[in-house]
Amino acid sequence: MPESILNGLFFYVLAVVILGGAIMTITRRNAVHSAIWLVVTLMGVAGLYLHLNAEFLAAVQILVYIGGIMVLFLFVIMLVNLDEAAKQRQFNRQWSLALICTLVVLVEFGFFLMRGAGSFAFAEPGQGALKPNTELMAVALFQDYLLPFEIASLLLLVAILGAVLMAKKEI
Amino acid sequence: MNFLESIWLIPLFPAAGALIMLLFGKKLPNKIVSIICPGSVLISFIFALGAVMQLSGLAERRYEKILYTWLPSAGFHMANGDMSRIGADWGFLLDPLSSVMVLVVTGVGFLIHVYSVGYMGHEGGYYRFFGYLNLFMFSMLTLVLGNNYLLLFVGWEGVGLCSYLLIGFYFHKKSAGDAGKKAFVVNRIGDGGFVLGMFLILATFGTLRFTSVTEQAASGHFSIGDPVFTLIALGLFVGAMGKSAQFPLYVWLPDAMEGPTPVSALIHAATMVTAGVYMIARSNVLYTLSPDAMAVVASVGAFTALFAATIGIAQNDIKKVLAYSTVSQLGYMVLACGVGAFGAGIFHLMTHAFFKALLFLGAGSVIHALSGEQDLYKMGALKNKIPVTYGTFMVASLAIIGLPPFAGFFSKDEILWLTWNSSVGISWLLWMIGFITAGLTACYIWRLVFLAFFGKSRVDHHVEHHIHESPKSMTIPLIVLAVLSAIGGWIGWPAALGGSNRLEHWLEPVFEPSHHILAAGGHAAELAASHAQEYMFMGLSVAVACFGVFLAYYFFLKNPAASESLATNFSGIHRVLQNKYYVDEFYNKYLVEGFCKGGGNALWRFDSSVIDGGVNGSAWLTRLFSRASIWWDTWVIDGFVRASAFAVRVLSYPVRLLQTGLVQGSALFILFGILIFMSYFLLG
Amino acid sequence: MPEITTAHYVMLSAALFSIGTIGVLTRRNVVIILMSIELILNAVNINLVAFSNQLMNMSGQAFAVFVIVDAAAEAAVGLGIIIALFRNKETVNADEIDLMKW
């Protein structure tokens, strides 16, 4: 099988996994089910990263997202009693309007890209290298984007404090 | 120092004293009060004395100082159609007439102030008494120094007010309060006439200034007997009747004895009650131009003199006797003015101020010694117990009956002599009345003297132990006044007795225009009578006085039983005299009651129909307006407010729908925004 | 089968973004709304990584890392808010929370 066909197959399978998982995520009545479908989606995205020469990111996606954030979600789901919510209406009153609008936006987006095939082009493929990926990532983060990196760490610190403050029973 | 320049200060010293007393007097100790108040009058006296001395040096013997125009006003039409302006000045006039008055007022006033320090020492309201007294001095000095009728009227009302306040000084006594009110009301009746006279003067001359009025009246444009002068003179005389206690408005003066004795001496004997005489003398030209008014004045004066003297004989209250004596003596002065002898009237005013003040102060000393006893039949044999009072009282008694060379002799004799010689048609009758009155005067005064100082003591036993001579502050004024009563008349020593009658010459410039008018009209009195005739009149009046004294001696000292049998034999007359001819009762029954009842009814009707009608009508109107206002408020004002609120509500409705507070709704709007932008780019 | 270009990735990203948006706008359960936000962030990441691959530039991937950090922070704070909200209002439904109305 030629490589391009393999590439296409790989992409489409992952796209189906991602979109299907996403749709299942937002339609499930049970929040735990939603979370598990979200994990599926995130796994799909991680696969896509691998395909796009971002091995490090794929690893981060699995470790941080699936291993960290999703566990956090599950904890919260356990803490908050969602039995009551599961029996209630799942969508709010504006859902049809929101759906239509979003789909229109999506169609317009697609229309952009269709037109873009002829009228505007993506930039030419670059000449740099993405491999060795982890090494280059280290260079990018610790040399080129050191200050944003530090700011991000500060952001996390603030977020931790904020989360503790929010979740505390009595201040 | 130029005292003439500062005559306007003379009334201000007592005014300052009064102000201090009435503002801070309550907090001042009596000692300071007794320095400030008599002191302020003393300063006034010194200033007055200085001013009169300097006045005598002037060629014209008239000094007028106008401080400012006090009542500037719009023009008005005089009776003859000319335009004029009222301009009442705050101005002062010092001429011989006012100089006599100002000296008498400040001099006697000062002595009585000093006397009051002793007399009122134990009374409550000490500062109040002196405050009123000083206020009175201010008003009286304004009265005599004012240069126009309106300023005179200001003083006139001021002394009336002070008289009211001081008569009612013991305001906790109902009789005192009533007496004060009576004095006030009766004086207002007189003031009505005075004001009318003043308006007539204004309408006739277009000015109220004494000098201008005199000048115009004496200019010869007006003929004698012009009815307008009769009206003016009678109007002014009604005022004088009230103030100077002439029949029929004298009734307040005897009641005024409810006030403290120094007040009776100062206000109701020496100064205030002579204001009417002063005013007549001041308006002498106007009176001279109206012989009819003169006749009325003379008749009223003579009648009052006799009428009051007869009442005085039958009174038992020491102060009441003196009060009627004052009325009688005022009658003399008015009689003198009425017969054109203004100078003699003023002369008698002056001597009367001395001896009547002395009599009242002496009576006050007696009352003081007897712890407040005023009934003559509870006195007697006091001559050795209070010798100074006795001695000075004797001098005054000799002076009032007109025994030479005491003061009363000269003034009373001049009046009688000039009355006899006057041009009034009934001059012999007037003289006769005056003559009889002189005898009666001697009789009632000496009756008082004999009952109080001689004979057997009828004093209550518990009072007897306390009889004592008065303190120095009281006896010294008595002595000074006794000296004045003795020799004060020498200033008018008649030519017939080898004197020169200096007072008459001094006053001459004031009364000169009257004499000119009389001379021009051929009405001048023929004073060609011989000195022999004058001696004869003097002898007659001395004789009648002695006869009066003898009657008093016989009936009240030597043979008291005779007086009692006389009283029983003529009980009708005695009762009428004792009850003062029932004049008060008459007034009460026909005037006061009638007025009160009729007036009350009328006022009640007026009240219930007009005032209440007005009130009810205005209430009805208010209700009507408030109804309309309610309607307007509810439908228009509220409607406007509601309509604007409704409009806001309606307009806000769609906007309100957007504001749900739901996060997802807001997010949907963001999506709308994206949609619109993208559509814009696609379609554009 | 045509070659898979960056446009395909962008289209996939747009679809994922749309699904996330639909989730945010329509679901009542705030936990699932937070999950939808994660979907949106992942759509962004796909875009970033796709362009990074095309341009052979590491910046896109570096930014993707930052986005993941951001997502973690957001999830922590958001879940804290959910707990506080549930504790006070006994609900996890977004349309029952309208405190911003007044």
Image (cartoon, helix red, strand yellow):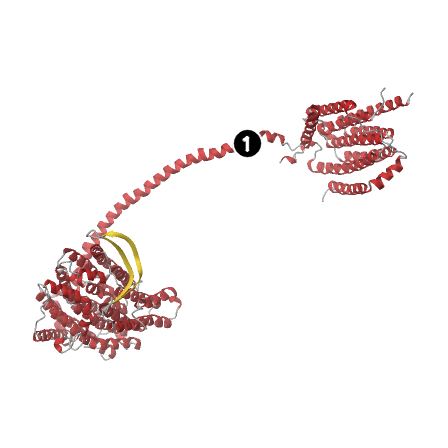
Q: In which quarter of the image is the N terminus of chain B?
A: bottom left
Quadrant of residue C99 within the rendered picture:
top right
Task: Say which element carries label 1.
Answer: helix
Quadrant of residue B313 within the rendered picture:
bottom left
Residue B415 percent across, percent down from the top left: 14, 69
Say which residue label 1 marks: B649
Residue type for callout 1 = Arg
Q: In this view, does B385 lie above or below B175?
A: below
Residue A24 percent across, percent down from the top left: 78, 25
Query: For this rendering, which residue is in front, B201 or B189?
Result: B201
Residue B462 percent across, percent down from the top left: 28, 74
**Residue furthest toward the right?**
A1
Q: Quadrant of the C terminus of chain B?
A: top right
Q: Report if residue C31 is visible in the image.
A: yes
Q: Mark 1 lies on which chain?
A: B
Query: Left or right: B492 with respect to B8?
Result: left
Q: Report if residue A29 is visible in the image.
A: no
Query: For this rendering, which residue is in front, A144 or B114?
Result: A144
Q: In this view, does B104 lie above or below A56?
A: below
Classify mark 1: residues with Cα within 10 Å, few (<14), some (14-19) or many (20+): few
Query: For this rendering, which residue is in front, B179 or C31?
Result: C31
Residue B407 percent across, percent down from the top left: 18, 75
Query: For this rendering, which residue is in front, B509 or B361?
Result: B509
Quadrant of residue B580 within the rendered picture:
bottom left
Query: Left or right: B87 with respect to A67?
Result: left
Residue drawn at point x = 31 percent, y = 65 percent: B135
